[in-house]
């Protein structure tokens, strides 16, 4: 039977006159990837640091692995792993030495070589940390976060600044952790990352949770349109869209984009194009994505940067 490893109820954090976190509640299921998203200043970092026992809440309750963050901090820290946003290590230590060093700090935990295999660093184990690429350094950071064999792992912006290939390699590591039964609490400003990896997403804005659900649930609930991109067509699409009661199509780079609201309207549009003998070279149909949902809900794009509150 599935169980919650994190339970947040009515969480509040006040700084002076500011309610940085304003009565939020959510759960994180065991063995899942949970993505926590919010624009800068939304209260995201404060919430995560409370859950990690770094800050104390003003009000509310947080249960972690069946324990209270205010009463069981030492026990909690033994069972969680944390990758901070700006992880760094000792330049002149090798990858293996780095992971071994941090393992010694805990006194027990995972086998170092097994960890290196888990995060795909076996071939780099004898390289100096200073000579690693950004993606490899992040994978070292994930290995360090796992030295105590935690049940719950917090990954704060694990792919910030990485090229697409390195980002995908980190995604593979995260998916591998999930397959091993680890629970992942992920913060990211890459919407594609959350859409690909997360089982459940919570979006925070101005201290409040404004939406929760799986990526598909959020897109179905808040995605405003299905985008139909028609390549190589002419101006005749405009009157067809107008007659269907749709918004004015967007044109550019040899493409015309028509936004419809339902799957049935996609079929009607195709029938109208056929009936009007409109010639075109290709058609793509795409639902709204998570980035559009986020922008619709918060009025802001999700960008990298510090979230002081």
Image (cartoon, rainbow, N blue to C red):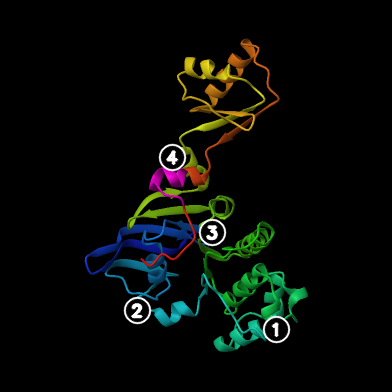
Residue at which label 1 appears: 94
Q: Which percent across, then down, holds residue 103?
A: 60, 84
Q: How many marks?
A: 4
x 39%, y 48%: residue: 298
Above or below 210: residue 144 = below
For residue 161, which quarter of the picture? bottom right
* Classed neighbour count for the residue bearing mark 1: other residues with Cα under 10 Å, few (<14), some (14–19), many (≥20): many
Residue at which label 3 appears: 33
Q: Secondary structure at mark 4?
A: helix
Above or below 286: residue 293 = below
x 32%, y 67%: residue: 61
Q: Nearer the viewer, residue 82 or 131?
A: 131
Q: Secondary structure at mark 1?
A: loop
- Pair 2/4: label in front: 4
Disc 3, disc 4: CB below 8 Å?
no
Disc 4, disc 1: CB below 8 Å?
no
Q: Quadrant of the C terminus?
A: bottom left
For residue 160, which quarter of the picture? bottom right
Residue at which label 4 appears: 222
């Amino acid at each position: 039977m599935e169980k919650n490893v994190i339970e947040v109820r009515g969480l509040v954090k006040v700084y002076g006159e500011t309610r940085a976190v304003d009565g939020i509640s959510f759960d994180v299921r065991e063995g899942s990837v949970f993505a926590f998203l919010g624009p800068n200043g939304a209260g995201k970092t404060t919430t995560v640091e409370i859950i990690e026992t770094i800050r104390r809440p003003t009000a509310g309750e947080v249960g972690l692995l069946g324990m209270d963050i205010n009463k069981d901090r030492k026990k909690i820290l033994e069972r969680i792993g944390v990758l901070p946003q700006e992880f760094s290590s000792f330049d002149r230590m090798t990858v293996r030495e780095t992971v071994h060093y941090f393992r010694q700090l805990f006194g027990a935990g995972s086998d170092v070589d097994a960890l290196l295999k888990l995060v795909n660093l076996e071939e780099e184990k004898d390289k100096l940390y200073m000579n690693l690429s950004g993606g490899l350094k992040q994978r070292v950071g994930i290995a360090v976060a796992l030295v105590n064999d935690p049940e719950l792992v917090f990954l704060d912006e694990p792919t910030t600044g990485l090229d697409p290939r390195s980002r995908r390699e980190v995604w593979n590591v995260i998916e591998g952790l999930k397959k091993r039964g680890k629970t992942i609490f992920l913060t990211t400003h890459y919407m594609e990352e959350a859409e690909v990896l997360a089982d459940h997403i919570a979006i925070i804005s101005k201290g409040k949770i404004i939406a929760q659900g799986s990526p598909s649930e959020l897109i179905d609930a808040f995605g405003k349109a299905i985008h139909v991109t028609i390549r190589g067509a002419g101006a005749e699409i405009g009157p067809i869209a107008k007659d269907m009661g749709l918004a004015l199509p967007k044109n550019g780079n040899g493409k015309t984009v028509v936004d419809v609201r339902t799957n049935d309207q996609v079929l009607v549009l195709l029938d109208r194009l056929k009936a009007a003998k409109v010639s075109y070279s290709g058609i793509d149909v795409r639902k709204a994505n998570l980035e559009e949902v986020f922008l619709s809900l918060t009025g802001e794009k999700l960008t990298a940067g510090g979230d002081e509150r």
